[in-house]
Amino acid sequence: MIVARFEEIVGEGGVLTAPEDLAGYRADSTYRVEDGIVAVVRPIDTEQVAEVVRTCRAHRIAIVPRGGSTGFAGGALPVPGQNVVVLSTERMRKIRALDTVADVLVADAGCTLHELREAAAAAGRLLGLDHGGAGSSAIGGNFATNAGGNNVLRYGMAREQVLGVEAVLADGRVISPPRRLRKCNAGYDLAQLLCGSEGTLAIVTAVALRLRPAPLARATAMLGLVSPARALDLLVLAREYLGEAISAFELMSRSAIAFHNAHAGVAREPLDEPTPWAVLLECESTSRFLDLDAGFDALLEKAIDREIVVGGTVAASEEQRRGLWAVREGIAVAMGQARFFMVKTDTAVPVGCVPEFVTRVEAAATERVPGCRAMAFGHVGDGNIHVNVLPPNGMADDEFRGHGAALSRAVDDIALSLGGTVSAEHGIGRGKRAALERMLSAPELDLMRAIKRAFDPEGLFNPGKLVG
Ligand SMILES: Cc1cc2nc3c(=O)[nH]c(=O)nc-3n(C[C@H](O)[C@H](O)[C@H](O)COP(=O)(O)OP(=O)(O)OC[C@H]3O[C@@H](n4cnc5c(N)ncnc54)[C@H](O)[C@@H]3O)c2cc1C
């Protein structure tokens, strides 16, 4: 009966129930579920979303909002044992406004990050959010997870792009339209509260995003280093030379690069002489009065002179630049596609603690599982370092899986002991709830639960995720 009502609301083609149609909705980048999805409902506009929410509320069936399902926390999937409706924004794809005077882009929640970046670029602007999942992830999902990615150092996380939001509340009312203002001190900032709420408070139907000037020049290099400590030396030096022009500072261990190469079947090394660590450094200028190449050359010369950098390659063309980024982004892809179990982490620590964090995680992992391989990579310019732990060669998948919880906990505990976080950018979803409880104080958890109750007293949205 509920399916027939959904069909009335969104049309027959907007509702999926056949097992073969649901197959594509059973996984995100990390998790997989075999059942629990009653129907996937795909509205095309906000009014349809509101009507679907009212219907689910009346039938007391929970809703799991879904964007591109590229998340790492299982947030867009039911928790085992549940029966839910998945509300997919995939048919909500309109760019509602692109204003190059106010520098604001307003888009439906289902637009992919990539298509919005392209639209901004076509208008001579930049949307300052980018990451390896841009091609498939939806802007609603990016907002709901407060996505980070490659350019946080310069442009901030998703929340720093957000001006306003349109969202459907649990009682079916709509907060609309998205505010487009840079300045608005009219009480609590609900857009910021919803940003990062992972589908637990409301369904996001549109967002207003700030645009930036498009870069006129870029300089990109992959630089070889002997240790993470040297990477921090390079970061400090780069800031001294190029200030806010630094747009990406990505650290990769040699083992992570080798893993990517093996996975992708790439024979050519990014650096002629492989080094234990590498940094992908990118700078951008939006002013024609800044000689970015001269600044970049001077920085590299000084870094070599001080023996901070021991090798490297500078991208001489856009193609070469993309080749360097393919290595960095390919690491996450390779780890995501690996056919064996590994411990994936999303920790961040104060930037100066990154070397200690890496050393302690390597030691803790080896102590628990001798021979395991800790591979570090991440957006180290903002302290976000993923250290994934892979099994020792030859260890059976099930045996290593048995160590998973203890290894994850050890990594999280080291991050927390350094004043860090268990979730830098992927969110809590269903997988990090216990870690969140260890990280937050009782008053913080109480407030979060009170906020959840205020927005969603009946537990309609994404139960079993975050604090819900
Ligand atoms: C190769 C690769 C690289 C990646 N790199 C990064 C990275 O560098 N940084 C980073 O932060 N992430 C990264 N990601 C993860 C992912 O792309 C982000 O988490 C993204 O923000 C998720 O968007 P999505 O549309 O796929 O959301 P989904 O996975 O569909 O959903 C994620 C969460 O948001 C909720 N949600 C989705 N849409 C809505 C909505 N309209 N209203 C309310 N709630 C909603 C869901 O319920 C769920 O809880 C990467 C992913 C891949 C595959």
Image (spheres, grey):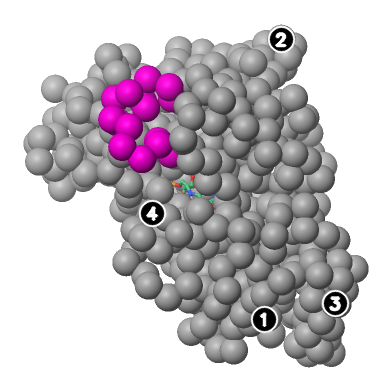
Give the label on residue 136, or none: none
Left or right of 211 on screen, residue 327 = left
Looking at this rendering, what residue extends furthest in the right direction?
240
Describe the element under mark 4 as helix, strand or loop. Answer: helix
Write down the residue under mark 2.
Answer: 442
Residue 185: % across, % down: 82, 42
Circle 2 Cα neighbour tier, 10 Å, few/some/many (<14 / 14–19 / ≥20) = few
Write down the residue under mark 1.
Answer: 218
Q: In 3D space, how far apart are the residues under numbered discs 4 and 1 (Cα atoms)?
A: 27 Å
- Disc 2 marks which amino acid? Ala
4 or 2: mark nearer the eye: 4
Give the label on residue 305, or none: 3
Q: In 3D space, how far apart are the residues under numbered discs 2 and 1 (Cα atoms)?
A: 46 Å
Circle 4 Cα neighbour tier, 10 Å, few/some/many (<14 / 14–19 / ≥20) = some
Left or right of 199 on screen, residue 217 = right
- Compare marks 3 and 4 and give the one earlier in the sequence: 3
Question: Can I make out residue 367 in this image?
Answer: yes
Write down the residue under mark 4.
Answer: 334
2 or 3: mark nearer the eye: 3
Residue 147 covered by magenta stretch = no
- Compare marks 2 and 1 and give the one earlier in the sequence: 1
Describe the element under mark 1 as helix, strand or loop. Answer: strand
- Disc 4 marks which amino acid? Ala
Q: In 3D space, how far apart are the residues under numbered discs 3 and 4 (Cα atoms)?
A: 35 Å
Question: Can I make out residue 132 in this image?
Answer: no
Q: Is residue 465 above or below residue 77?
A: above
Residue 331: % across, % down: 46, 56
Describe the element under mark 3 as helix, strand or loop. Answer: helix
- Compare marks 4 and 2 and give the one earlier in the sequence: 4
Q: In 3D space, how far apart are the residues under numbered discs 3 and 1 (Cα atoms)?
A: 23 Å
- Compare marks 4 and 1 and give the one earlier in the sequence: 1
Q: Tell me which residue sits at (52%, 23%) in the image.
A: 368
